[in-house]
Amino acid sequence: MTFRERYMAGEAEFDEIFGLAQKWNFSDDPRTLREYLGLTADEEDIWISESDEALEKYLEKEKNRWIFFTDLDGTLLNDEKNITEKNRKTLEAMREKGHVIVLSTGRALPSAKRQAETLGLMGAGCYIVCYNGGQIYDTERDALIYRQSVPMEVVRSVFDDARDFGISIQTYTATHVVTEQDNEDLHTYVQIQDLPFMVVEDVTQALEEEPPKILALSYKDPSRIQEFRSYIEPRCQGKLDLFLSHAALLELVPPSVNKGNAVRFLCGYLGIPIGHSLAAGDAENDLTMIQAAGIGAAMCNGEAFLKEAADYVTLADNNHDGVAEILEKFILNAR
C-alpha cells in the first residue's frame, strides 16, 4: 500500500511522509515521488506551492470525504420524475460537507446533464456516469474523463438482428437518439428523456463516431425484451454486455462497461478509498454498482435480487425520501 492509502485507512501518521521522501531520494525507484507516495496531482501541487501543513490539512479533509453514487429513475427521483424536498436538502448537506455526488444512470449524457442542472448538481464535486458507465462526465470541467464505445460493425449487426427479430432499436450521437425506425417506442422514449431524434436510412452512415451504447425497446410488451435478450445474447458473446435498466429497456454496451466499474474508476481518479463509497439503486443495471461500492444500498421498491445483494435495504421507497434515509444513516448522521 502507498503512504496515501495507509494514511486514508488510519494506518499511517503524516510525519511518515518525510522519511519516505528521503528513502525515495536515495533509491532507484522509477516512479515519481507523487506516484511513490500515492498522492494525487492536486495534493502534490498543494505540497509544492503551499506547505507541509497545508498538505496535512488537505489530506485530513480528504480522509473524511465520501463519494455517493445514485441512480435516478426509481431511486433519487420519484415516480413523477421529480426529487422530493428532503432528498434535495440532504444532497445539499452532502455538498456543503465536501462529499462527492455522482448521478449514475443509463440515460444519455444530454438528458443526464439537464437532470443534473435541474437538481442543482453541477460544478465542483459533481459527476455524471451516463450510458450505464459508457461515459463519465466532470460537470465542473465540462469534460468527459472516461469514454467507451461500440464498434460500428457491431452496431450494424445488432440493428440487423433487431430488424429481423421485429423489435425497436436505437443508438446515440452526442446530441440525438438515432434509429432506423419511426415508431411509438421511439416517441415514448424521447418524450420521457427529453431528447431530440433522427430517423435515418442507415445508422452507421449517420453516426460521426462510434456510439456509447445501443438500446432495444418494447414499452407495450416488455416480454419481447426478454425474448430478444435470449435471441441476441449468444450473437453478442465477447462483443457486448447486456442488462436491463427497465423492464422495457435492454442495454447493449461494450464489454466490462457497467456502473460498478465506474465506481472503481472514479474512486481511483479522485483518490477516494472504495470503503468511502456509497451507492444506491433499484434495477438490474445497478447491481454491479451496489456490489462494487463500499456500502451498497437497494431501494425497497427495487428488484428482489438487488435487495438480496445489497448491504442495506431502505425502509422508505423512492417516493418517500429513500435516498435521504441512506445518506443520513451512513454519512451525515453516522458516528
Image: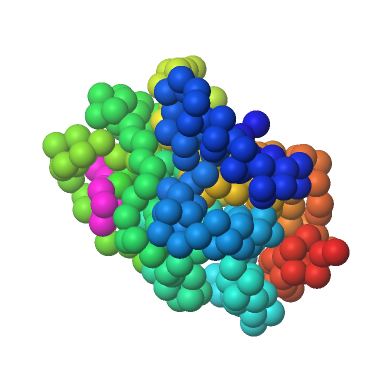
**Observer-nearest residue: 221 or 64?**
64
Q: Quadrant of residue 52?
A: bottom right
Q: Is residue 196 magenta?
A: no
Left or right: residue 153 compared with residue 189 = left
Q: How is the image coloured?
A: rainbow
Q: What residue lies at 81% left-to-right and 41% top-to-bottom?
A: 308
Left or right: residue 116 compared with residue 305 = left
Q: How many marks?
A: 0
Q: Quadrant of residue 115?
A: bottom left
Residue 258 against residue 30 in the figure, above or below = below
Magenta region, mostly helix, strand or loop?
loop
**Res. 160 in view:** no
**Observer-nearest residue: 299 or 155?**
299
Where does the image place residue 65, in percent across and percent down from the top left?
A: 64, 59
**Observer-nearest residue: 239 or 79?**
239
- Quarter containing the N terminus: top right
Where does the image place residue 236, in percent across and percent down from the top left?
A: 43, 21
Residue 197 against residue 237 in the figure, above or below = below
**Res. 234 in view:** yes
Q: What residue lies at 44% left-to-right and 28% top-to-bottom?
A: 31
Where does the image place residue 183, in percent across and percent down from the top left?
A: 33, 52
Q: Quadrant of residue 200?
A: top left
Q: What residue lies at 48% left-to-right and 47% top-to-bottom?
A: 40
Q: What residue lies at 32% left-to-right and 43% top-to-bottom?
A: 171
- Quarter containing the C terminus: bottom right
In the image, the segment drawn in magenta is 173-180
Left or right: residue 77 compared with residue 212 = right
**Observer-nearest residue: 166 or 56?**
56
Where does the image place residue 98, in percent across and percent down from the top left?
A: 59, 68
